[in-house]
Image: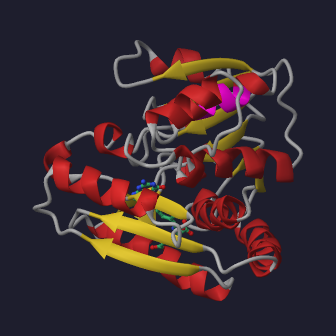
Amino acid sequence: MKTLPGKELAAAIRAQTQTEAAAGPQPRLAVVVATADEASLWYVRSIAKAAAGVGIACDLVDLGPGATLDQIGETLARLSADANVHAVMLQTPLPEGSSAQEPAGAIDPRKDVDGANPLSLGRLAAGLPAFPPATAAAVMALLDHYEVELEGRRTVVVGRSTVVGKPLAHLLLDRNATVTVCHSRTRDLASVTSTADVLIAAAGRAGLIGAAHVAPGAVVIDVGTNPTEGGGLTGDVASDEVAGVAGALTPVPGGVGPVTTALLLRHTARAANLP
Ligand SMILES: Nc1nc(=O)c2c([nH]1)NC[C@@H]1CN(c3ccc(C(=O)N[C@@H](CCC(=O)O)C(=O)O)cc3)C=[N+]21
């Protein structure tokens, strides 16, 4: 089985982004945080670090886990109206499991570099220009980088979130893949996933995808970033088991994650250079 790492691709995207960022006024990304979620805060720190590395300014706007949806929406609207800010992102999860969809409607679609405004998802579905969520874009970037054929092939996405599963289904359809979306209520998950030429695991459940879920030779993309007890990270795919069946598998860590961060910065540089 082949391993499909994301680190080199991420480095190449960052290098290109650095060039794009240097072409005009310095791009500025504002990241709004209203959570105490550890994984989310780790991601925010890694965005800030990577942004500094490619010449992008990054402002953290921390509203604290007690912020109301109104406060979040007002902050996103204020940043969207600020001509010095080119890109606006709202970290999820929000407090008390509130949906980010409602306040994210306040992000100017031209600055919506993580595709969080429902308008961005609608534009994506309609085939109009929009920034897809960075994670969904990272899956496509990895498939393209490793030259995985999509046209006419069976792709199965496990997970229907607005950040990954739903936008990814549109991106795959756009490439003429045959797309099936599974989720927590899918009956006999393995019977569906084992038909996939390309299987994308984005359910957020550690080890959900085992050997019985995978067709021999399938390409498996693991989007899961589940925290482990030891403070590490593990995917949705039981990799030791699946390695014996799949043709190729992205690792966690070192797969989709680094590409996600790099693409968020690429989107930021492009938002800054929009006419
Ligand atoms: N609006 C929004 N968009 C997101 O895309 C989003 C979010 N909110 N909230 C939090 C989650 C989490 N997430 C990760 C991204 C990269 C890595 C990543 O690069 N991880 C490293 C390793 C980390 C380690 O080893 O601890 C890797 O996979 O190699 C992880 C997690 C994006 N998220």
Measuring from the top left, give residue 123's x and y in whole percent: 61, 29
**Quadrant in which residue 6 is drawn:** bottom right
Q: Is residue 192 visible?
A: yes
**Quadrant in which residue 187 is drawn:** top left
User: What's the residue at 48%, 53% (across, down)?
Assistant: 235
Q: Nearer the viewer, residue 261 or 271?
A: 271
Magenta residues: mostly which secondary structure? helix
Q: Is residue 231 visible?
A: no
Left or right: residue 219 compared with residue 258: right
Q: With respect to residue 3, does 193 lie above or below?
A: above
| Magenta segment | 168-172
Q: Quadrant of the C terminus?
A: bottom right
**Quadrant in which residue 17 is drawn:** bottom right
Measuring from the top left, give residue 134's x and y in whole percent: 59, 53
Q: Nearer the viewer, residue 125 or 8?
A: 125
Measuring from the top left, give residue 169's x and y in whole percent: 61, 27
Residue 213 magenta-highlighted: no
Q: Nearer the viewer, residue 111 or 78?
A: 78
